[in-house]
């Protein structure tokens, strides 16, 4: 019997065959094991994904790039830019991750929330890979949901410490005042009209970090080094509130990076494990209050101790379990604590 009021999409095939690397390739398996051993989830909560079809991948990526991946003809420079070593097995893992995000999006639309215990490869561009990301699974899932007529409008809320440059490049942007000034109160507009976009992108990230060039999201929040829990949560509230004043999504894609953590090797923010869980709770609370389905992906996490990365990711599942079980019980989630 399932323990959770939502599905966790996971496969052993998520393992990235990249050898010794700052990216902990085994983290998906460790998250799976921790979810089981902690009693948070059991086998019946998990769904095995199928790999994405090439047609799905091509909704986002160029045929030239997909050809290079499938025939192993990336240039040395292109492989360096991806920062993970090319192999056919790696291609399979990314096609599977994209299929996992498609499955998670479908389940989210049924159950209000669903997780891909993987994914969040937000640095992948239509025509190249970057920063450990080959295929933009979240974008593929959004485009597939749109193609299937399940949604028209999606919002990406990217809380990885690194800016979602691939997401921004794929979905374009609008020049908004909010981008420079997240506290600006936008005039309300009819949702989906005059917004000029079908995917609204929000990225909260450390300014002084990769990627050096940050193509504009709909809203970018460039955080200073050593941003604390309280500061981060205030900026997140500002950005999400501002986004939802101007855009009404039918699916929220939450990129729940673990790397804003103060002990992350590739991050320079000062969030605590508890602060990161409050971040997760905030996202779920907003989504529940507004009745927006949420698809969660995990993106980066490079804590000095891999156990911390696992804890932060598992806490996102805990946060959803607490929020959505409570809501099922008919209690008022907005009055929590
Ligand atoms: Zn990251």
Image (cartoon, rainbow, N blue to C red):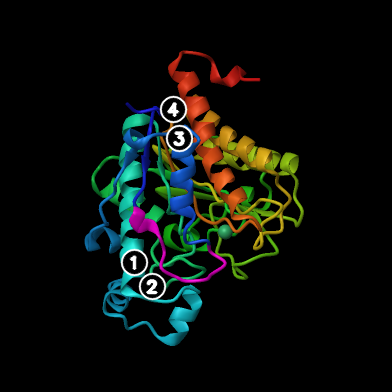
Q: Do the residues labelled 1 and 3 touch (CB within 8 Å)?
A: no
Which residue, as the protein is rendered here, is positioned at the far bottom?
Answer: 76
Q: Name the residue under label 3.
A: 190
Please give the name of the residue rendered at 47% of the width and 61% of the height, measured from the top-left corner. 25
CA–CA distance in space, label 1 to label 4: 31 Å
Question: Is disc 2 placed on a helix, strand or loop?
Answer: loop
Q: Do the residues labelled 4 and 2 touch (CB within 8 Å)?
A: no
Q: Which of marks 2 and 1 is nearer the N terminus?
A: 1
Disc 2 vs disc 3: which is toward the camera?
2
Q: Earlier in the sequence, mark 3 or mark 4?
A: 3
Question: If the picture is divided into quarters, which one holds ligand 1?
Answer: bottom right
- Locate residue 302, reporting x and y percent: 60, 59
Q: Which of marks 1 and 3 is nearer the N terminus?
A: 1
Q: Earlier in the sequence, mark 4 or mark 2?
A: 2
Q: Do the residues labelled 2 and 1 touch (CB within 8 Å)?
A: yes
Q: Please state if 199 lies on the left or on the right of 66 as rendered.
A: right
* Image-quadrant location for residue 107: top left
Question: Is disc 4 placed on a helix, strand or loop?
Answer: loop
* Image-quadrant location for residue 127: bottom left
Label of residue 127 in the image = 2
Please give the name of the residue rendered at 49% of the width and 67% of the height, measured from the top-left corner. 132
- Locate residue 83, reporting x and y percent: 50, 74
Q: Which contiguous range is marked in magenta? A: 12-23
CA–CA distance in space, label 1 to label 3: 31 Å
Q: Which of marks 1 and 4 is nearer the N terminus?
A: 1
Label of residue 61 in the image = 1
Label of residue 291 in the image = 4
């Amino acid at each position: 019997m399932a323990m959770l009021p939502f599905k966790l999409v996971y496969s052993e095939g998520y393992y990235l065959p990249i050898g010794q690397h700052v990216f902990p390739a085994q983290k998906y398996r460790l998250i799976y094991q921790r979810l089981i051993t902690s009693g948070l989830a059991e086998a019946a909560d998990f769904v095995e994904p199928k790999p994405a079809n090439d047609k799905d991948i091509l909704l986002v990526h160029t045929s030239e790039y997909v050809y290079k991946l499938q025939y192993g003809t990336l240039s040395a420079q292109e492989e360096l830019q991806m920062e993970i070593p090319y192999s056919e097995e790696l291609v399979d893992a990314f096609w599977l991750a994209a299929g996992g995000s498609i499955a998670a999006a479908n389940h989210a639309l049924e159950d209000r929330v669903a997780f891909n215990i993987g994914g969040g490869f937000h640095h992948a561009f239509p025509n190249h890979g970057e920063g450990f990301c080959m295929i933009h699974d979240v974008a593929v899932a959004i485009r597939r949901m749109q193609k299937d007529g399940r949604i028209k409008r999606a919002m990406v809320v990217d809380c990885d410490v690194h800016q979602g440059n691939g997401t921004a490049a794929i979905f374009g942007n609008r020049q908004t005042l909010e981008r420079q000034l997240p506290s600006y109160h936008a005039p309300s507009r009819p949702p989906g009209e005059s917004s000029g976009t079908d995917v609204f992108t929000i990225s909260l990230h450390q300014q002084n970090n990769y990627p050096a060039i940050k193509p504009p999201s709909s809203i970018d929040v460039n955080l200073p080094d050593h941003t604390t829990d309280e500061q981060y949560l205030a900026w997140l509230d500002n950005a999400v509130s501002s986004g939802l004043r101007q855009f009404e999504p039918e699916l929220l894609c939450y990129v729940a990076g673990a790397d804003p953590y103060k002990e992350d090797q590739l991050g320079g923010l000062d969030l605590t494990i508890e602060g990161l869980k409050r971040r997760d709770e905030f996202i779920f609370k907003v989504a529940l209050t507004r009745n927006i389905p949420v698809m969660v992906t995990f993106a980066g996490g490079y804590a000095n101790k891999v156990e911390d990365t696992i804890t932060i990711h598992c806490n996102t599942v805990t946060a959803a379990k607490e929020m959505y079980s409570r809501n099922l019980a008919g209690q008022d989630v907005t009055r929590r604590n």
